Structures are given as structure tokens and as C-alpha cells.
Image (spheres, helix red, strand yellow):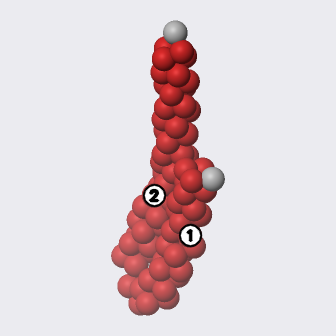
Amino acid sequence: MIELLAQAAATGEDTIAASEALSSGFAYGLAAIGPGIGIGYLVGQAVTAMARQPEAAGMVRTTMFLGIAFTEALALIGFVVFILLKFA
């Protein structure tokens, strides 16, 4: 009987660990969706702007890279939250 209770307790701990891993992975997945969409939209609009005004391509490219860096920072923040949820 005691062995069955110990086995049930271990199974409960495993379930909690599995749900923590699943929730932290889900949180990082959600955090990566937004920056992915944002970077895709940003690059698409920059290419359109460079095609319409080739003489402004240098300025558009610089602004595009700054926007990509700021948008990618959101994905990195999401990764940090993922690590905090996983190991805290």
C-alpha cells in the first residue's frame, strides 16, 4: 500500500514538472510569434519603399535594421521569460 502511495506521489510530481515545461514552452512560442510577424512586415514594407524610391534605399535600410533590432529584442525578452518560468 505504501509503495502505491509513493508511486502516486512521484506521478503527481512528474505531472507538475511536465505541465511546467509545457507552459514555459508555450509562453516562448507565443513570445516568438509577434516578433516574427513584425520583422516580416517590416522587411516587406522596407523592400516596397526601396523599390519605389531607390535613391532613399540607404536611409530605409538603416531604419529597417534598427526596427529589426528593436523587434528582435522582444523575442529575447520572451526567451528570458521562458528561462525564468522553466528554472524558477
Identify the amino acid type marked 1.
Ala
User: Does the residue at mark 2 contact the one at mark 1 (Cβ under 8 Å)?
Assistant: no
Q: Nearer the viewer, residue 11 or 42?
A: 11
For the view shown, which residue lies furthest in the top direction? 1
Q: Is residue 48 left or right of residue 34?
A: left
Q: Answer with the quarter of the image where residue 44 lies.
A: bottom left
- Name which residue lies at 57% across and 62% down: 80
Find numbered disc 2 in the image and state the secondary structure of the residue it sits on. helix
What label sits on residue 36 in the rendered view? 2
For the view shown, which residue lies furthest in the front direction? 2
- Name which residue lies at 55% across and 57% down: 83
> Residue 36's spot in the image, x, y percent?
45, 58
Earlier residue among tags 2 and 1? 2
Q: Which residue is mark 1?
A: 73
- Name which residue lies at 42% across and 61% down: 40
Q: How many marks?
A: 2
> Residue 7's spot in the image, x, y percent?
48, 21
- Name which residue lies at 57% across and 53% down: 87
> Residue 29's spot in the image, x, y percent?
48, 48
> Residue 48's spot in the image, x, y percent?
40, 70
What label sits on residue 39 in the rendered view? none
Distance from Cα at disc 2 to Cα at disc 1: 11 Å
